[in-house]
Image: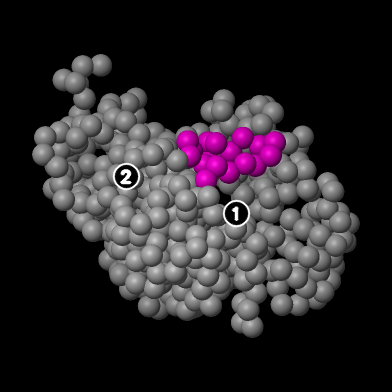
Amino acid sequence: MSQHHEPIVRTPAGAVRGSRERTGERYRAIPYASTPTGASRFAEAAPHPGWTGIRDGTRPSPSAPQPVRNFGRLDLSPYFGPGWIRGEEYLTLDVYTPGAGDRRRPVMVFVHGGGFVTGSTGAALYDGRAFARDGVVLVTLNYRLGIPGFLALDGAPDNRGLLDVLAALRWVRDTIGVFGGDPGNVTVFGQSAGATLVAALLAAPAAKGLFRRAIMQSGSGTGAFTPEQARRITGAAATALGTEPTAEAFAGIPDARFLDILPALAGVDLKTATATDPLAGLSPFSLVLPVQPADALTEGPAGDVELLIGTNTEEGHLYLVPQGKFATSTDTDVLDVAAATGSAPEAALATLRALHPDAAAGELRSALLGHALFGRGTAKMRTAHAELAPGRTFAYSFAHRSAAVDGQLGATHTVELPFVFDLADEPWLHGDTGLLGRGPAPEGLARRVHRAWVDFAGHGDPGWSPYAGGTDSVEVFDA
């Protein structure tokens, strides 16, 4: 394709050349903030100084430094993306638009998951073609991860990855108009760690006026570490690096070294007098907040925002099935999870057994994990938002069971994403190791889920009644 046919958009920071696709135009690797290097990795992101000439927006962005994640028999590369693509300028975003110009289309800004340590705009699952096809301008973004993004350090602001998301939302407010988007109709949506970041945005004073709607897919409104918990991780990191726990001391350490020490942070005991580990040991990083987002919604834009929120019915399976731990789980394993994730493990277990009298140990272990990681914090957020903004909370439950890993994977964490992005028929999601397993995706489910997200972003109504307590106001997605 000759450059003559490639679209060019002039942003306040400079011109960007994109590529034409069947459903619209795509602009990649646009910087929304200045490059985080050295000491600036531990500072709030500064606005990008801009560029002269025409920037090439046809190639993928570098990604935030991140470790390789392995999920046993399951190929999760469409979710995690290509891993660490080295390059300093990774605070970037991608824009998919039906067409640049002066149309005012709904805007959706996606915040990826990956346990606060992995993920990028390069993940195949976040392809925005279906959103552009349906009249939405989709923005996907990278943010700082791991130690640069979330480690609490003296001399540095907390939650730098969240500050990056705020910077990207300000970029959207100031710039998305030239891509055909309406800065007054922005929906921010995220999955997993990304949804927990969305929860924080709902409670953040700095987020007021930056978006009109929010979607939380399998996140938590109670997923933040307390400052005391964060200090334990900081202490372990400083010890592993042989240095002081300050931004100044960390400034000279290369990113690769930060990745080397991540295994040393995996076993830190985060149980305190007032809190259990909200991530059940799955990641040493989260938001660091004195008050959980679900308890601080009046501080932020939540009362003025419509919220679509839900979880999958078997979230915990992802952490047990592909690794072969689901079938081999014992009663001791179940009790260990109950003890790690709650203050009254025996009582929690008794309640769960009464609800599921025929459940095997693997199912109970998965249910406890799923509830601790996502269910509990989603329920609290849903209730808190419905009380603050009556009639503006919409709840869903995703119940379609993936046939992956010998039919065992089920309606687990991440399985809704191909349906939200209307990519469920892509061959790379199928087969023996694919997220959706052998055989075709159920007819019409992706269309239904994707349409609900698009309708919600367009006018605040996903197609069912607002949440009013109880299960009858929760929309269930299943084949």
Residue span colored magenta: 67-83
Crowd class of label 1 (few under 14; some 14 to 19; many from 20; radius 10 Å)? few
Label 1, on which residue? 263
User: Observer-nearest residue: 172 or 24?
Assistant: 172
Examine the image and state in which quarter residue 375 appears: bottom right
Q: Amino acid at mark 2?
A: Glu
Q: Farthest residue to the bottom: give it.
A: 273
User: Observer-nearest residue: 26 or 330?
Assistant: 330
Secondary structure under the numbered disc 2 in the rendered image: loop
Label 2, on which residue? 88
Placement of the N terminus among the 4 image quadrants: top left
Badge 2 vs badge 1, beta-carbon distance below 8 Å? no
Please report the residue visible at 43 percent of the width from the left and 75 percent of the height from the top.
Answer: 297
Q: Earlier in the sequence, mark 2 or mark 1?
A: 2
Placement of the C terminus among the 4 image quadrants: top right
Q: Is residue 150 above or below residue 11?
A: below
Q: Position of residue 82 (x, y in %)?
A: 47, 36
Find out whether residue 78 is within the magenta segment.
yes
Q: Is residue 193 left or right of residue 249?
A: right
Secondary structure mostly seen in magenta is loop
Q: Farthest residue to the left: give it.
A: 52
Q: Is residue 2 above or below residue 155?
A: above
Can residue 402 be seen here? The reply is no
- Kindly report the distance in space between the C-alpha atoms of the residues bearing marks 2 and 1: 24 Å
Q: Farthest residue to the front: give it.
A: 242
Please report the residue visible at 60 percent of the width from the left and 58 percent of the height from the top.
Answer: 264
User: Observer-nearest residue: 448 or 195?
Assistant: 195
Q: Is residue 123 above or below residue 344?
A: above
